[in-house]
Image (cartoon, rainbow, N blue to C red):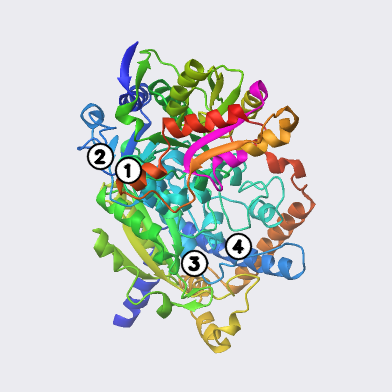
Amino acid sequence: MKEHETVTANNNRHEQLGLTDGQVLDMYKYMVLARKFDERNLLLQRAGKINFHVSGIGQEACQVAAAFALDREKDYFLPYYRDYGFVLAVGMTPRELMLSAFAKAEDPNSGGRQMPGHFGSKRLRIVTGSSPVTTQVPHAVGIALAAKMQKKEFVSFVTFGEGSSNQGDFHEGCNFAGVHKLPVIIMCENNQYAISVPLHKQISGKVSDRALGYGFPGVRVDGNDALEVYAAVKEARERAIRGEGPTLIESMMYRLSPHSTSDNDLAYRTKEEVEENWKKDGVARFKNYLIDCGLWDEARDQDLIAQLNLEIKEATESADLAPFPKPEDTLLHVYADAEGGA
Amino acid sequence: MAVMEYIDAIRLAMKEEMERDESVFVLGEDVGVKGGVFTTTKGLMDQFGEMRVLDTPLAESAIAGVAIGAAMYGMKPIAEMQYSDFMFPATNQIISEAAKIRYRSNNDWSCPVVIRAPIGGGIFGGLYHSQCPESVFFGTPGLKIVAPYSAYDAKGLLKAAIRDPDPVLFFENKKCYKLITGDVPDDDYVVPIGKANLLREGSDITVISYSLPLHFAMQAAEELEKEEGISAHVLDLRTIQPLDRDAIIAAARATGKVLIVHEDNKTGGVGGEVSAIIAEHCLYDLDAPIMRLCGPDVPAMPISPPMEKFFMLNKDKVKESMRQLALY
């Protein structure tokens, strides 16, 4: 009897967090969309259709769960380059991301200027990002400062990897946010590797413990458990809106893909280690949860994958056919007040 | 019209813009209660409160980065670097971020931030309270850089910088703060960014400069005219990025003899680019090789008085260079 109760409780975790069946199914859809999108990009790069791809495989469950815990109509987002699951869940379309992968003129992220994975969309409040890592943390703090100054009810949400958490901008940004009690959620996607350098050579303590020094809570969550991530981000958002300041979340996961399409990961880690971590994959785990809840089954899964693959195929074809920027448009948008500026 | 010090003109520009636009705010080390280590922001916290005149932690990359974030949201931050010598930790935020935000987002996002930083020596500041870092940022498209020499320009250029939709580095000369006074109109004027200013018309030689050394050039020009009948044409660049090419070319053509003067060291300085513009556009109008009078190519200015004096420009050094050029 007792065992039965435990099973029932586990099957209702999402309801206890205030998530409807429809919402968790939606979350799963975005996780699979991100996974399939990512896999397609790896193939496109290998086929010579696109130049480059940085993968987020293994991190999608966390990314999508975090997005669902935020206000996707109001909050400001400063994702890092692996956050395909996150940006899809806050409204970027596969076609828009493909336009970026193909570096086409219509790419809303950068008009084909930046590498893929450098997200940005004012419409979606996804703040433009760069490649030098962690510069976005002070930006998120600045946006949170604006929210406080203007008495607006939104938060900023920023992500980065554990390697990046060693940058000065992480520490300077956290400290500033702590001093001024700003509504910002600072989430480290700890995927165990900074390109080839493993966690133990990056950090001797815990990223989440660093929050103590900045005077706000730091929590470590299982990034492969979407609902645990959702609960942590939701609570952080509530604290921020109540005026209680920032939260640091360290989400533990594993980068299942190589760093990028230019990386051979088996030069610094074993096949066995990677395979072991595939068993912990957050997307598969969430699928099993939905099946246990009676909300999902293999047949529906196959249908979903077929539908998403079709959507991605259409996005790919559309982006492939879309025009490149005009060469001379290289000169545009240096400043607001000049047609060129160069 | 009031006569005021250069530093008062900077403060007045911030005060007027903060009164005019609620999204304008100041942040930096010691800017609040203390009113800045030079008193540049004195009184602003009393008028506008501690949220709009924000004392920040001692961390320059955060000062710049937080200001950039707020600017992307739509605020108009004025970030103060206590000394320009200390803005190098913020260089990544300024060059990789602020300068590229409009460009990399294909005009979707923008970054209307102003970063104020005191430049220059002659105050016994030693290596790290005396530098002119213009050349570090010069040549980074996406940034605008201004460097006023007078109280009038300080107010007008700062107001223009605050209203500018793009990032502006405002290099104020700390030696000018109290040394330089001038007429500053009470009305709401701006000095346009990107336009040089002809300070003096002349027919024998042209001096092109910005910031403090222009005062030396102007005094030297008066004396040379009176004492030796040498007539100098003096152009203030006012904005050092983007450079006003037309004004530079016109000034070079006016006399055919050009002296470029700045306190920043010669190699890689703004003067090299001004010189190249002249060489590209009006080489055959020249009657003498282009001359440059700049700080020496040493890492920075020593504190020992004779060494500081050796490094610094002054009226006599500028006058001697002008005389040599006139006699060429």
The residue located at (20%, 37%) in the rendering is B33
- The answer to the question of whether label 2 and label 1 lie on touching residues, with beta carbons closer than 8 A, is yes
Disc 2 crowd rating (10 Å Cα; few below 14, some 14-19, many 20+) is few
The residue wearing badge 2 is B37
* Residue at numbered disc 4: A33
- Rounded to the nearest whole Å, what is the CA distance between mark 1 and mark 3? 44 Å
Q: Is residue B261 magenta?
A: yes
- Write the start and end of the magenta stretch as one range: B253-273
Are tags 3 and 4 found on a single chain?
yes
Q: Confirm whether circles 2 and 3 share one chain.
A: no
Which amino acid lies under the numbered mark 2 shown in the image of this protein? Val
Furthest residue toward right: A321
Instruction: Identify residue for label 1.
Output: B82
Mark closer to the observer (1, 3): 1
Of residue B312 and residue A113, the one placed in the foreground of this image is B312
Q: Position of residue B142 (x, y in %)?
A: 57, 41
For disc 3, the marked residue is A61
Label 2: state its secondary structure. Answer: loop
Mark 2 vs mark 1, CA separation in Å? 7 Å
The amino acid at mark 1 is Gln
